[in-house]
C-alpha cells in the first residue's frame, strides 16, 4: 500500500482542516482507550486519568496535525506547479555554433540554419520580427529616406 499516495489523495480531497480533525479524533479515542484499558487492568480507576487522557490529545494533536498536513499540502501544490513548469520548459544547453556574420546556427549534422528556425526546432520559443533603432535608421538611409 502506498501510504504517501493515500495521504496525498486524502489531503487533495478533504484538505488540511478535515485531516486535522480526523487525527485529533483518532488520538483522543486511542488515548482514552489505552487509559481505560490500563485502569481496568490495574484496577485503579481515576476520573483524573480519564480527563487527562481525553484532553491532552485535544490540546496537542490539532496544532501538530494541522501544521504537518498544511506543510504536506503546500509540498503537493509546489510539486504539482513544478511539474507543470517543467513540462513547459524546453531548454537549450551547451555550445551553439553561430556564424559571426550572418548569425546562422550549425546543427549537430553540420547543416546551417537561420537562428529563428534553429531556436524554434530546439525550444518552445517563438519569434516576432522588427527592426532595432540602428537597423531602422540604416534601412531608411538605404532607401533614401530620413527617419
Image (cartoon, grey):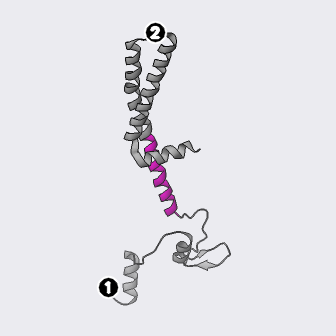
The residue at 40%/46% (across/down) is 14
Part of the protein shown in magenta: 71-89
- Residue 44, image x, y percentages: 46, 9
- Give the quadrant of the C terminus: bottom left
Q: In this view, does 29 lie above or below 98?
A: above
Q: Mark 2, residues whose alpha carbon is within 10 Å: few (<14), some, or many (≥20)?
A: few
- Label 1: element kind: loop
The quadrant the N terminus occupies is: top right
Disc on res. 44 = 2
Q: Are marks 2 and 1 in contact (CB under 8 Å)?
A: no
Q: Is residue 70 above or below residue 78?
A: above
* Picture coordinates of residue 53, whole percent (x, y): 42, 20
Report helix, strand or loop for mark 2.
Answer: loop
Per the rendering, the mark at residue 146 is 1
Q: Is residue 93 left or right of residue 57?
A: right
Tell me the distance, in whole angstroms, between the alpha carbons under discs 2 and 1: 104 Å
- Residue 11 position by quadrant: top left
Where residue 39 sits in the image (x, y, percent)?
47, 14
Q: Can you say whether 13 is above or below 57 in the image?
A: below
Residue 65 versus residue 6 in the image, above or below: above
The residue depicted at 41 percent of the width and 29 percent of the height is 61
Amino acid at each position: 500500500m502506498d501510504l504517501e499516495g493515500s495521504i496525498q489523495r486524502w489531503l487533495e480531497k478533504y484538505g488540511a482542516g478535515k485531516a486535522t480533525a480526523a487525527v485529533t479524533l483518532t488520538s483522543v479515542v486511542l488515548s482514552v482507550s489505552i487509559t481505560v484499558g490500563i485502569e481496568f487492568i490495574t484496577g485503579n480507576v481515576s476520573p483524573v486519568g480519564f480527563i487527562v487522557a481525553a484532553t491532552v490529545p485535544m490540546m496537542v494533536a490539532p496544532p501538530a496535525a494541522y501544521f504537518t498536513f498544511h506543510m504536506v499540502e503546500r509540498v503537493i501544490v509546489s510539486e504539482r506547479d513544478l511539474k507543470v513548469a517543467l513540462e513547459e520548459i524546453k531548454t537549450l544547453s551547451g555550445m551553439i555554433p553561430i556564424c559571426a556574420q550572418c548569425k546562422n546556427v550549425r546543427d549537430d549534422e553540420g547543416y546551417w540554419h537561420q537562428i529563428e528556425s534553429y531556436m524554434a526546432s530546439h525550444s518552445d520559443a517563438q519569434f516576432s520580427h522588427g527592426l532595432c533603432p540602428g537597423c531602422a535608421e540604416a534601412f531608411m538611409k538605404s532607401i533614401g529616406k530620413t527617419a
